[in-house]
Each structure stands twice: as C-alpha cells, then as structure tokens.
C-alpha cells in the first residue's frame, strides 16, 4: 500500500541527513517540505523563534504537546543542557514510530521521552509517572482546539510555577482564538505575540509566548 507522508519524510532524513547530526536532520526535513511535500512541522522561520525562546528560558523540565514527526522535538532537544527532563506527547502510534526514528537518527534519543497517548489523559499523570513537579517550558503544537482545555489542565494539576513559559504554535493559522483570548486577558499570564508565517509559506502565522505569573 502507498506510504504515508511521515514515512516519506523519514526516508528523506535517512537519505539526506548525517546520522547523529541534528542540524542536518532539521535541514533535511525543511528541504523535503519546501521541495517535495508540505508538512505541518513548525518549520525554519518559526523554528528559529522557538530556538531563541528555549535558549532564553534554559529549562530544566520541558513538555511538548503533539510530537508529529519529531521536527520540533529535535529542534528543542538539541539546545537542552545535560540532565534536562524533556517529555513529548503523541497519540497517533504511527507518528510515534516515525518520530522516535527521526529523533534517534539525530542522536537525541537519550534527551527526550516520546510518550504515546493523549494530553488529556497524560497531563494528570506527569507527577506520578515522570516525577515532574512543574514544567519550566511547554510547547503547544497539537490540535488547536485543545490548547485552552490543556492549559487549564496544567493549572488544575499544579504543573505551572511563577515564570513557567508556554509557547503556542499556529495562533493565527489554523488559529487558536479561544486560547489567545484566555492568555491575553487572564491576569495570571503575561503574553507576547511573535509574528511570522505558516511554515514554508507566505501565509501569516505566529507564536504566542505566555509566562505564568503566580
Ligand atoms: C487530543 C488532544 N491531545 C493530543 N495529545 C497528543 N497528541 C496529539 C493530541 N492532539 C493531536 N495530537 C497529535 O499532534 C499532531 C497534530 C497536530 C495538529 N497541528 C495542526 O493541525 C497544524 C496544522 C497546520 C495547517 C495550517 C494550514 C493549513 F492549510 C493546513 C494545516 C499547521 C500547523 O503548524 C499545525 O500544527 C498529530 O501528530 C496528532 O496525532
Ligand atoms: Mg504547528
């Protein structure tokens, strides 16, 4: 049967990138998306903003929602200090399989744990299953209508501390209007919008960075 886009993306990485070299894995995926098939990775332009926020926060605990093929997982993991706890959640088992191979090809398999399951089920398990008290940095890039319910779940589960940074992809395209309204109007967050473009296109999109205040 016909291969899937994530499978073709993995093949492109194995063909074009150098094993153990995260930069070449990132470049191979961006090349694939620009010249072969568009895919919903955060991409190079927004990826550079992601890089700068991760570097600025220098987190000890990181959570990513929506691993997909592991592109942003590789971008984040390559910047983390040794000993950082990085968890990424993905509920599609086929995507888990591809992401684990792409992350391993980059040589970053020891930096991140890919957990199969839904954020709604797994967020409440973070403390007991993974020994997390709070997250210093959270990257939201899963179903856009789940950003708001999941940020509320973080609050309910006591997984945020003063200064925790949440960075959300696609707040313009496809858009996460309820999430934006919440973080921009809640007194508990300080929010800032980073304008950019939808990955590999000229369509407007951007990232919203929200700092938890108490
Ligand atoms: C049920 C919610 N919880 C979840 N828990 C764990 N993993 C989840 C969850 N939701 C979705 N996922 C996974 O995250 C990934 C989904 C991401 C959704 N992203 C988008 O829809 C998206 C879509 C676009 C886009 C933009 C313009 C278009 F014309 C077409 C697509 C661009 C992006 O950057 C995107 O991130 C999948 O791998 C899915 O299996
Ligand atoms: Mg996205």
Image (cartoon, rainbow, N blue to C red):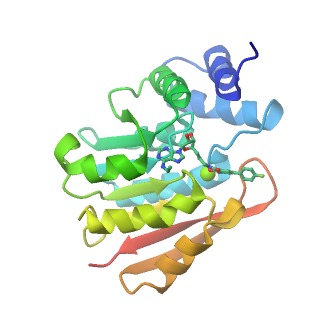
Front in this rendered view, residue 214 or 1: 1
Using the image, determine if residue 123 lies above or below residue 150.
above
The answer to whether residue 164 is seen in the rendering is no
Q: Nearer the viewer, residue 2 or 32?
A: 2
Residue 201 visible to an observer of this rendering? yes
Residue 191 is situated, as x and y percent measured from the top left of the image, at 48, 77
Location of the C terminus by quadrant is bottom left
Q: Quadrant of residue 77 in the image?
A: top left
* Residue shown at 22% from the left, 42% from the top: 130
Number of numbered tags placed on the structure image? 0
Image-quadrant location for residue 6: top right
Quarter of the view holding residue 87? top left
Residue lying furthest front = 121
Residue 5 percent location from the top left of the image: 71, 28
Q: Give the residue drawn at x 49%, y 29%.
A: 96
Quarter in which the N terminus is drawn:
top right
Residue 108's place in the image compared with 182, above or below, is above
Q: Position of residue 157 (x, y in %)?
A: 25, 62
Q: In the shown orientation, is residue 40 left or right of residue 83?
A: right
Q: Tell me which residue sits at (59%, 34%) in the image.
A: 26
In this image, 133 relative to 164: left or right?
A: left
């Amino acid at each position: 049967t016909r291969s899937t886009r994530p499978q073709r993306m993995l093949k492109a990485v194995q063909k074009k990138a150098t094993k153990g070299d995260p930069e070449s894995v990132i470049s191979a995926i961006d090349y694939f998306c620009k010249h072969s098939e568009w895919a919903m990775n955060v991409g190079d332009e927004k990826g550079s903003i992601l890089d700068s926020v991760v570097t600025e926060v220098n987190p000890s605990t990181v959570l990513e929602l929506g691993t997909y093929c592991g592109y942003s997982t590789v971008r984040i993991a390559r910047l983390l200090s040794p000993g950082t706890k990085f968890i990424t959640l993905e509920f599609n088992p086929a995507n888990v399989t591809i992401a684990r191979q792409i992350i391993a090809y980059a040589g970053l398999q020891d930096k991140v744990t890919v957990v199969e399951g839904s954020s709604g089920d797994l967020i409440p398990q973070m403390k007991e299953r993974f020994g997390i008290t709070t997250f210093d940095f959270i990257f939201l890039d899963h179903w856009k209508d789940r950003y708001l319910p999941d940020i509320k779940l973080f609050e309910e589960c006591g997984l945020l501390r003063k200064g925790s940074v949440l960075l959300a992809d696609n707040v313009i395209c496809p858009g996460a209007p309820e999430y934006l309204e919440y973080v921009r109007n809640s007194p508990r967050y300080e929010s800032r919008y980073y304008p950019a473009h939808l990955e590999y296109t000229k369509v407007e999109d951007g990232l919203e960075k929200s700092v938890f205040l108490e």
